[in-house]
Amino acid sequence: MVQRAKTILGTNEFTALYDKGYHTRSELKTAQGLGIETIVAIPDVPSTSQAPDHAYNYENFKYDPASDTYTCPQGEALKTNGKWYKTHGRRNILISFKQYKTRACRSCPVRMKCTRSKTGRLIERSIYAENYEKNRKNILEKEHLYRRRQAIAEHPFGTIKRQWGFSYILSKEGINRASADVGFMFIAYFIRSKYNHRLKRFKLTGKTSGKKVLRQTPVMGKPRLNQTTDTFRRNSAISRRTSKGSVDYFFEIIKELTICH
C-alpha cells in the first residue's frame, strides 16, 4: 500500500497513518524501509501480558543499543546471552528474538509488582523491535495527526459498516468484482454525504398541515425556497441495508434523491 502511494506521489515525504489492524512487523518495516514516516495505532496489550503494577510494563524498560541491555524502573540492567531464539507468530511466520533477564530479580523488593513469574522478569526483543519503537515515538510526538485521521477516515467506514450494514462483501468471485461492490458503497456514501450537506443549508421554520417546513436562507439575494421535511428526509427505505446488495442499494439511493429533486 505504501509502495503504491509513494509511486503515485513521487516522493516519500508524507506520513502513513493506519489503525491498529496494520500494526504488524511487515507493514512497519516496509514503510520505514522506504523512508516513510509511520503513525500506526498500537493494539491494547492483553492483561495477562501486563505487569501486576502497570508502572512496570514493558514500555517502562529503557533499551540501550550501545550495550544491548534493558534497564528496569528499579535501575537494574537486564542482559542477554546473545542467542537468537525463534517462534512462530501470526500467519505462521517465523520470528527471531533475544531474551533479557537479570539475577537482581531474586532479591528485588518490588518483584511482585513487576512479574508473576517464579524465575523473574523476562524481556523478549524481536528483530522488528526498532520498527515498533520508532512508531511509538511518532505517536507520542504527533498524536494530533492520528486524531485527525480518526475524524476523517473512521466516519465513512462507521456509517457504511454499522448504519448501512455493509459489514461484508457479497461478491465472492475475485478481487475485481469485490472492488466493484465496494466501489458502489463508496459512491453511494459520497452522494449521500453531498445530499446531507445540502440539508444543512436549510432551517426548520414552522409547520404546514402538520408537516415541518424547511426554508432555505437567502444566498446572494436569491429568493427563499420552501420544501417539506419529508421531501428531503426520505430515509426510511434506504437508511439501513436490507437483503439487497450494494448495486441495488446504490440505485435505490439514486432513485430516492432524484425524486427529492
Image (cartoon, rainbow, N blue to C red):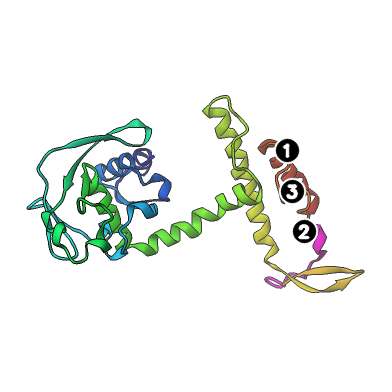
- How packed is label 3: few (under 14 Cα within 10 Å), some, or many (20 or more)? some
Q: Which mark is residue 238?
A: 3
Q: Which numbered disc, 3 or 2, marks the residue closer to the eye? A: 3
Q: Which residue is mark 1?
A: 243
- As shown in the figure, which amino acid type bears the numbered disc 3? Ile
Residue 232, label in figure = 2
Position of residue 235 measured from the top left corner of the image (x, y, whole percent): 76, 54
Q: Horizontal placement of 47 versus 12: left or right?
A: right
The residue closer to the viewer here, 233 or 25, is 25
Q: Is residue 104 above or below residue 242?
A: below
Q: Amino acid at mark 1?
A: Ser
Nearest the eye: 31 or 59? 59
Circles 3 and 1, Cβ within 8 Å, touching? The answer is: no
Q: Which residues make up the magenta segment?
A: 218-233
Asked if the residues shown at circle 3 and circle 2 are in contact, with their CB atoms under 8 angstroms apart, the answer is no
- Taking the spot 21% from the left edge, 59% from the top edge, the residue there is 61
